[in-house]
Amino acid sequence: MKSKLRTTAIILLALLLSLLPAAAAAQGGGQSLELSLKRTFGYAGGGGQIQGRFAITARGPSDLASVTFLLDGKTMAEVAQAPFRYSFSTGDYALGAHTLSATATTSSGQTLSAQPLQLNFVSAETSASAALKIAIPILVGALVLALISSIVPALSRKRKPFELGSYGLAGGAVCPRCGMPYSRSAFGPNLLVGKLERCPHCGKWAIVPRASQARLQEAEARYQQDAHRGEVEPDQQERRYERMLDDSRFDE
């Protein structure tokens, strides 16, 4: 008899324990309130650091009637219609750590609370410094990639033999070292002040702007005079290459 009573008591206790979660869910309605923070204009970094203007939004059950937004337990705003959102500026509050939370009521009279957000309001100087630390490496990397993508194809592309008076779409240039004219490559890397080009006469690299017609004519006359004296010869001539190599040893 005692064993039967013990068994019955165990079964009743198990049933009671199984009903407790359901009762708790019925009491809370199985409903929750969630907060989300969105940057409107400003800075948002790691560790909850924010600066500028932000919007906080509360999401809950369909019968949500009103939401009270709180900062460090003090009311920031009360919103009584959807969307339950409030915009604020960190500049209106003291710098440092803050707790952003919210409470809400439903049309049935139920009270809900959201999991608070731990934030750190920082100054504009701090946010600018942090943003620069992120932006500068990205900009440098993008610039390096742009230079590589433009310089490598230009260096590997075979240039056409030099023709006096023929300079193409990119125009002509005058070498700052030997003073001879040559055509600029249309695909050469443009470095704002000029294109990075290799002189076909002396073999030196330089950033050269587009030369005027007058400068080109002067350089052409100098080229023809030197050619008559035998001082300017094709690049493929062995003696010319030897002189270029000798000169480059002293320049570099």
Image: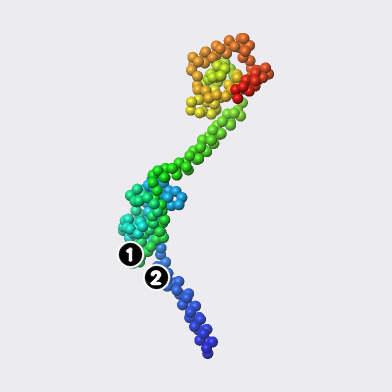
Q: Which residue lies furthest to the bottom in this view?
A: 1
> Of helix, strand and loop, which one carries label 2?
helix
Q: Answer above or below: position of 53 versus 221.
A: below
Q: Where residue 205 sits: x, y (%)?
A: 57, 24
Q: Residue at x 40, y 64 (%)?
A: 31
Tell me the quarter of the image containing the C terminus.
top right
Q: Which residue is drawn at 56% across and 30% down?
A: 151
Q: Where residue 206 sits: x, y (%)?
A: 55, 24
Q: Residues within 10 Å of mark 1 (few under 14, many from 20)?
A: few
- Of residue 28 and residue 175, the one placed in the foreground of this image is 175
Contact between labelled residues 1 and 2, with CB atoms less than 8 Å apart: no
Give amino acid for label 1.
Ser
**Image quadrant of residue 83?**
bottom left
Q: Name the residue under label 1.
A: 107
Residue 21 visible (yes or no): yes
Q: How crowded is mark 2: few (under 14 residues within 10 Å), some or many (20 or more)?
A: few
Q: Where residue 248 sits: x, y (%)?
A: 62, 22
- Of residue 114 and residue 84, the one placed in the foreground of this image is 114
**Dot label at residue 127:** none
**Image quadrant of residue 154?**
top right
Q: Name the residue under label 2.
A: 27
Residue 161 visible (yes or no): no
Q: Nearer the viewer, mark 2 or mark 1?
A: 2
Instruction: Give the total number of marks visible in the rendering.
Output: 2
